Image (cartoon, grey):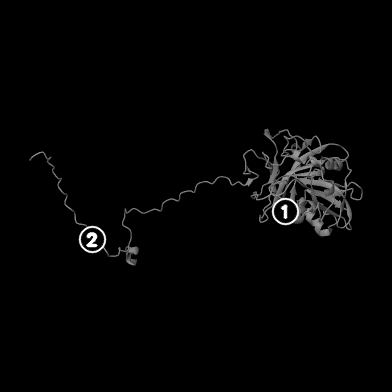
Amino acid sequence: LGSRPLTIAPAARPVEPVAPLSTAPPLAPKTPSAAELMRPRPEGAARREPSPRQPSPRRSPRSSRKLGRSTSASSSELSFGSGSSAVRLLPAPLNKNRVCEYGWLTPLLSSLVASQAAGVTDLASGTPGATLFVVCGGCPNSFCGMQAVLYTHMRSSPPELDFWWIKPKKEDGSTLERATLDRHSKGEHKNDPGRSRALYAQFADLFAVGGGAEAAARASRAGGGKLRFEVVGASGPAPRALIVDVESRAHYYIYLIWQEDWTSNPFARSKYIKGKLVYQRDPTLPEYFARPYAYRDGVLSVPPHAELEEAVAEPMARSDETRWSSVGSELRRVGGRPSSIAAVESRAPARPRQQAWGADSPE
């Protein structure tokens, strides 16, 4: 055979014939006739039971994101009251704004609690007035800078309760811009409420100043039969806004309303504001207190429980640690558990917050 190697080829496998593809249509399932349907089932034949419905997985509690925090219900929330006036306290703050950032309001608030209200003027009409109280906490936000809402008693005919924006100085954020104490409808210090008027008018509606029978009925409905609203000393130089608890006879001479949380979605069916009322019990004494409130769908709730009242050292807190989720920097124990008493929420489900109030205010 010589030097060439011997190679043996493997045996080839026989090729199996491939069955031709069937072109006949698939057989339709046989439909039983009426006689077969009426035929009795043989004894012992197993009855086909429908498979049990599997329970859907339990959903987690619904929550909404507000200022980067979850507002879902917590097992540590504390509830007070019952029925339509029932409220629950949130154990953690929601508002990123700090009370100490509003130090520029201190001179104005000090004059309010001393019954030395600053005189104001509507520059468009020339109507004079006097300051009553301030609402703050909603600004600054991603849509507007630092500002607050000033409520005033205007000596027009008939008298009315008006409000507009007040701001710190641009060059010094720690000092009130005195020009904004007057109402400007145009110019450099334009500060009329604009489109935000509908949002903040509900605090003015509480007192029904010069609004006739319709305004009085609206204020009565806002109190829910438990609160009464008055402007005392309206004819004098220093009027005060007063909330009276009808049952306990407690008097709250308010000078500041803090916004901790609120609904700003204009399409929400239910709207609310919640936070703290800061007030004096006796307007002649330098003693200041705070307690939570909830204002939902035109009805204001202020829990009258004594354990919810907190003493405030001065009209406006200056500590950087104070968030005014509780109006002092200390935590309190309520019901045997520590709580900052952050805010108060009615039992109706909360709506998601989409933007902060005052977004359309003039800069």
State the residue at coordinates (70%, 40%). Answer: 342
Say which mark, if any, is on residue 20: 2
Q: Quadrant of the N terminus?
A: top left
Q: Is residue 155 visible?
A: no
- Residue at the outermost left position: 1
Q: Which residue corresponds to mark 1?
A: 360
Query: CB under 8 Å between callouts 2 and 1?
Result: no
Q: Is residue 153 visible?
A: yes
Q: Is residue 323 left or right of residue 31?
A: right
State the residue at coordinates (80%, 56%). Answer: 217
Q: Is residue 208 left or right of residue 13?
A: right
Circle 2 packing at 10 Å, graded few (<14), some (14-19), many (20+), is: few
From the image, state whether disc 2 or disc 1 is nearer to you: 1
**Residue 70 in picture, x, y percent from top left:** 62, 43
* Residue 248 or residue 278, whichever sits in front: 278
State the residue at coordinates (34%, 63%). Answer: 37
Q: Is residue 295 left or right of residue 42?
A: right
**Residue 353 in picture, x, y percent from top left:** 65, 49
